[in-house]
Amino acid sequence: MSWIPFKIGQPKKQIVPKTVERDFEREYGKLQQLEEQTRRLQKDMKKSTDADLAMSKSAVKISLDLLSNPLCEQDQDLLNMVTALDTAMKRMDAFNQEKVNQIQKTVIEPLKNLSHRFGSVFPSLNMAVKRREQALQDYRRLQAKVEKYEEKEKTGPVLAKLHQAREELRPVREDFEAKNRQLLEEMPRFYGSRLDYFQPSFESLIRAQVVYYSEMHKIFGDLSHQLDQPGHSDEQRERENEAKLSELRALSIVADD
């Protein structure tokens, strides 16, 4: 955010220190960025949970398709393997649904409410910023007027106009300083309160993920034990699979031309 002062009626005197203007722009910019990031985070979390659900539903669909494959009717070992896979995928889907429900309730909805809170706060904040800017322009205009009379020859009429200009300037300066001070006090306080809203949601997100992946470790560990053949190492299984693939490649219907 940057200010573009009017060219007409600008005082020579620096009425607002540059450090104050920089502080104001920084604090206001942080709130604008916070609003945008909160809205984006809410949308990204929704996309993430939708993708999680689609993944587990697809896994269940694949296991069901395998169960209905005629090959399973011809080979009991294959049927047992696919049945174990189907059970694991359904368990995964159930835990995934629990995780998504937890994230929806403790993360997405609070972020949505926080975004709505920003939505109600920011119009008021933007209006307050506009009022501050208008007060600043009035302050600059009247300060320039005072400086104009201060530079003229000190005749009776000029001194009278100078006194009147200073009287006009005083309440305008006080009004600007009050508006500026209030915003500089309240914007950092509002920004600092963000942790009170974000931290519980993020803690809940981490706990939901930890519970889910702990359960996934158990599910796929059980599945691995069911599928493992006693006395077979990974190297043996790899050699057996390669031998079977070699037999398939040797068939005339898959041989290279």
Image (tube, helix red, strand yellow):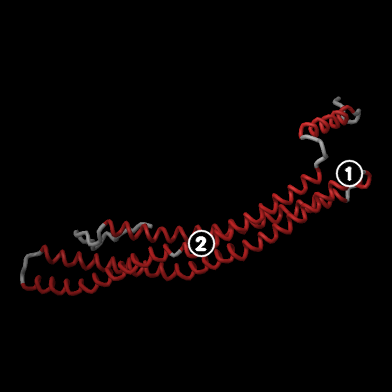
Image depth: mark 1 or mark 2 in front:
1
- Say what amino acid the circle numbered 1 marks: Asp
Q: Quadrant of residue 99?
A: bottom right
State left or right for residue 83 relative to residue 42: right
Q: Residue at x 80, y 53 (%)?
A: 87
Disc 2 secondary structure class? helix
Residue 167: percent from left, percent from top: 17, 74
Q: Which residue is mark 1?
A: 77
Q: Residues within 10 Å of mark 2 (few under 14, many from 20)?
A: some
Above/below status of 171 relative to 14: below
Quarter of the picture holding the C terminus: top right
Q: Which mark is residue 198?
A: 2
State left or right for residue 141 relative to residue 255: left
Residue 12: percent from left, percent from top: 19, 59
Give whichever of discs 1 and 2 has the lower sequence position.
1
Q: Which mark is residue 101?
A: none
- Say what amino acid the circle numbered 2 marks: Phe
Q: Residue furthest front?
A: 231
Q: Residue at x 88, y 47 (%)?
A: 79
Disc 1 secondary structure class? helix
Q: Nearer the viewer, residue 96 or 212?
A: 212
How many dots with numbers?
Answer: 2
Q: Residue at x 53, y 60 (%)?
A: 39
Above/below status of 66 relative to 5: above
Q: Residue furthest top?
A: 257
Q: Residue furthest left?
A: 155
